Image: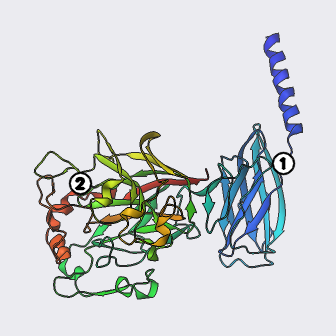
Amino acid sequence: MKKTLMLWLFLTLVEITIQQRFKLPEVTLEALKTGEVRVYIPNRDGIKKFSFHANVQTEIVRSEPGQYKNETKAGDDFWVLTFNVPNLSKDQNISYWYSVIANRVVYVTDGGWTVEELKDFYEPLKDPECKTSVTVVSGGQSSCIGWPILDDNFNGPTVDTSKWFIHHKIPTYSPPNFEFNSYLNQDDTRFFKDGVLYLKPIPFTDDREVRGVLNLTDKCTSSNPKECLYIHKSSFLLPPVKSAKITSKLSFKYGKIEIKAKLPSGDWIVPIIELEDRTETDGESFPKVWIAYSRGNKLLKSEGPDDLGSHWLYSGPVINSMEPTRSKFLKSKHGENPFSNDFHIYKLEWIPGKMIFYVDNEVYGDISTETGFAEFSMDVRSDWTKPEAPYNREYVLSLGVAVGGLFDFPDGYNSDNDIKPWENSDRHYISRFFSGRNAWMKTWHGDDVALQVDYVRITAL
């Protein structure tokens, strides 16, 4: 009993000493022209959680929820939070309080800040021990090793448009992929459930839905007029599926990209988890880098033993749309179960001269980019002759779901016992696909057809 009391007194004295030593870090606020506000404190030993509450142009009461609030449970050199203020302008006042949990104690303080400048971008946060990263961001900004470039846990209720660009267009009759779907900025193709982002293709079943006019002109995100307005002509139907796609507004060169996701399941469906060249119009052209690609067909076979279905995962540089170059640099992994059955962590480490691909922290392929790929380009340009080209510049991350297309499903392959309803050389590919809907729609089950994304993390290396 006496020993227990002495131990309790000792631990209490230690805890009091720690509390007395701890000094609550000062908070720093910065704002962008987009309305995003970044809030950060330097890391200190013992910190376990940082929470922030704020009101704009209204005084806040300490410990009461603010108009804007956020918290984080993990930090390296800094603990960083962001929130978005619509119509934020200079000279507005932000009243705040924040708390830090450290050494099992909650520390709280409050304060105020006036917006003196709206920046185009944030400068990387650097502490005295910052080691400059090879990663560059959005026009060549430098960063520190380990610094988060993009972090989104998709808690909803809407897509964070300060981080993501939402596509709204009709790619069906346009190169390079000729997807059989439109990408629409609608709540039924893009939604949240239990902290997961769903990007979901939805088929049309009525013949009347694929005839007439699809006019996206008012909110179209493409510079190609054909992708904003399409009028059905004869067998050239409107897209028989609507889907969703988002692309990061931030671009970067080099970094660690980690995505926890459940891939879509269903015939003639493919996920979009890829890097796209930010310099290409609408981000739709090649080159790309697949981070996770797996066809939604459970079994996709020709007359031989080869299966291209959802047991196979592919990643790697994709230089152009034409075989054999399209698949030349891909790495693959065969799974005991379809990759669409469960969530997996897909990761790419992109460093100077090399790309390394992981699934669930297991390396399954790497490729050297050091000498470049100029000899495989369909349009050899002077900038492709440089070392590492075309992977010597900044890329953006895209997430979404595509259906059909003229390059993702080779002719001569059938889905289990169902014949592929179109041929890639047939100009009437859309009407053939739509006519075969009774077969492929029976493999589309609820939200399983969606790409489900738990989180995205891009970190400087």
Label 1 sits on residue: 24
Q: Position of residue 373 (x, y in %)?
A: 42, 60
> To which quarter of the image does residue 405 belong?
bottom left
Q: Which residue sits at x=45%, y=77%? A: 281
Q: Which residue sits at x=50%, y=55%? A: 195
- Name the side, left or right, on which 31 lies relative to 177: right
Q: Amino acid at mark 2?
A: Asn
Q: Position of residue 179 (x, y in %)?
A: 30, 71
Q: Position of residue 59 (x, y in %)?
A: 80, 69
- Mark 2 is surrounded, within 10 Å at the Cα level, by few (under 14), some (14 to 19) or many (20 or more) other residues, namely many
Q: Is residue 165 visible?
A: yes
Label 2 sits on residue: 297
| 157 vs 360, nearest the viewer | 360
**Quadrant in which the N terminus is drawn:** top right
- Name the side, left or right, on which 144 lies relative to 17: left
Establish if 242 lies above or below 135: below
Label located before the other in sequence (2 or 1): 1
- Name the side, left or right, on which 48 lies relative to 289: right
